[in-house]
């Protein structure tokens, strides 16, 4: 799709999203979900940058405020009330993410003494680390777009709270690990296993936040993520990031572009991390029958997972341009050039995914409708990806 057409299509999608989820009048009560809303904020910022229309910036800021006042507080019907951080109304408003943010699932979280039901756990509330990092990323981009660094401070407060809750030391060792899912108040783990890419995602996001925070004259000394970055780097050491999951692959390619941008800006030393991530992305893209999912009927497919890969392939395009404009910085690592040439041939896969889900016929299935908000928002991201991808 041509760039101008993509902007127009993304704008229609995001304005409809704002209405349907209660962000703008006509949609009823607010319907907030953290992952979807993180992409939504980035999309509005992207549209603001592309069009210069301040209305999109205002929508991004309204969405940030609504997420904090819905997902930063206990859900309706909970015996607990107010901010999940436990702060007073006024203090909670000043530090809206300091206690973390709920996922926004429909069911209550599992109690600490309740048995685990793996099927139900997918529909229960709580906190996911990889959702929180998406929100940190969104807040940081808002800080850049508005020049108001309080959004970066909020992101760093959230980062410290998340790290404190999710990272733990294995008993009897010095080994650090991470929980995959925590309770709403971050007091106990709901799923003790570690998310495959959570440490890597956290490390890159925290470096991103730290680099922005260094420009903030009002940042308190307590908002330094140096210790957290060191601990996440230790967890990431010798990590195996390979995956054949489409959303995970897209996330790796997006992480590669973030790492490259931070490297060019001098926030990361050396290009080793970029090479490792690109190398880990390759097996999942080139394994036999990789494109078979394209021939499966729409009713059996999850659009948002495929669109995650499409967004990652847009990141790969921008990575190629970044390397081209900073040849000297990458000149010493010839492996990166070789990997890029190999990965480049998979770009048409993203175009096919995007075209499939733009077809109105493929949006009529129950599978699309059940995940309408996340599907539409990630389609909008794929159409205008710079709001999400460019630091």
Image: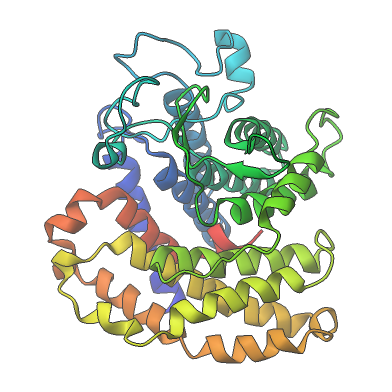
Q: Is residue 236 left or right of residue 57?
A: right
Residue at 62% in and 33% down: 158
Q: Residue furthest front?
A: 172
User: Measured from the top left, where is residue 27 in percent x and y?
Assistant: 26, 34
> Residue 248: image x %, image y %?
46, 63
In terms of depth relative to the viewer, which is nearer, 114 or 283?
114
Residue lying at 33% horizontally and 60% vertically, measured from the top left? 304
Q: Nearer the viewer, residue 36 or 385?
A: 36
Side (left or right) of 199 relative to 23: right
Is 71 located above or below residue 387 in the figure?
Answer: above
Q: Quadrant of residue 353?
A: bottom left
Residue at the image point whose x is 83% and y is 30% from the top: 218
User: What percent of the width, then of the height, locates residue 66?
Assistant: 45, 29
Out of 32 and 174, give the one closest to the viewer.
174
Q: Nearer the viewer, residue 128 or 31?
A: 128
Q: Quadrant of the C terminus?
A: bottom right
Q: What percent of the width, then of the height, locates residue 188?
A: 49, 25
Of the 4 image quadrants, the one containing the N terminus is bottom left
Q: Is residue 324 left or right of residue 52?
A: right
Residue 300 in the image: above or below residue 66: below
Q: Residue at x 80, y 36 (%)?
A: 224
Up-down relation of residue 317 to residue 373 (above or below): below
């Amino acid at each position: 799709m041509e760039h101008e057409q993509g902007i127009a299509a993304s704008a229609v999608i995001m304005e409809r999203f704002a209405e349907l989820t209660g962000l703008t009048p006509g949609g009823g009560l607010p319907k907030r979900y953290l992952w979807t809303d993180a992409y939504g904020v980035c999309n509005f910022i992207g549209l603001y940058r592309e069009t210069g229309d301040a209305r999109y910036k205002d929508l991004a800021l309204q969405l940030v405020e609504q997420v904090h006042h819905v997902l930063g507080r206990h859900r309706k019907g909970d015996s607990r009330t107010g901010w999940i951080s436990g702060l007073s109304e006024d203090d909670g408003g000043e530090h809206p993410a300091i206690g973390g943010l709920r996922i926004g699932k429909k069911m209550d979280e599992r109690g600490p003494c309740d048995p685990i039901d793996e099927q139900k756990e997918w529909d229960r509330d709580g906190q996911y680390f990889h959702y929180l990092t998406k929100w940190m990323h969104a807040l940081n981009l808002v800080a850049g777009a508005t020049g108001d660094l309080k959004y970066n401070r909020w992101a760093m407060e959230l980062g410290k709270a998340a790290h404190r809750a999710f990272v733990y030391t294995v008993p009897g060792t010095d080994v650090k690990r991470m929980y995959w899912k925590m309770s709403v108040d971050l007091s106990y783990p709901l799923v003790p296993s570690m998310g495959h890419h959570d440490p890597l995602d956290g490390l890159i996001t925290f470096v991103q936040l730290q680099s922005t925070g260094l420009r903030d004259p009002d940042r308190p000394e307590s908002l330094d993520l140096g210790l957290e970055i060191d601990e996440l780097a230790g967890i990431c050491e010798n990590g195996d990031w390979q995956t054949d999951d489409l959303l995970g692959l897209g996330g790796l390619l997006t992480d590669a572009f973030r790492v490259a941008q931070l490297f060019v800006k001098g926030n990361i030393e050396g290009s080793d991390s970029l090479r490792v991530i690109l190398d880990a992305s390759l097996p999942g893209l080139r394994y036999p029958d990789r494109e078979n999912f394209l021939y499966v009927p729409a009713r059996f497919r999850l659009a948002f997972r495929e669109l995650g890969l499409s967004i990652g392939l847009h990141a790969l395009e921008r990575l190629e341009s970044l390397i081209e404009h900073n040849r000297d910085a990458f000149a010493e690592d010839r492996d990166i050039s070789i990997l890029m040439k190999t990965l480049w041939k998979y770009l048409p896969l993203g175009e096919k995914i995007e075209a499939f889900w733009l077809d109105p016929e493929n949006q009529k299935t129950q599978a699309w409708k059940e995940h309408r908000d996340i599907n539409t928002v990630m389609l909008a991201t794929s159409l205008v990806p710079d709001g999400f991808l460019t630091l």
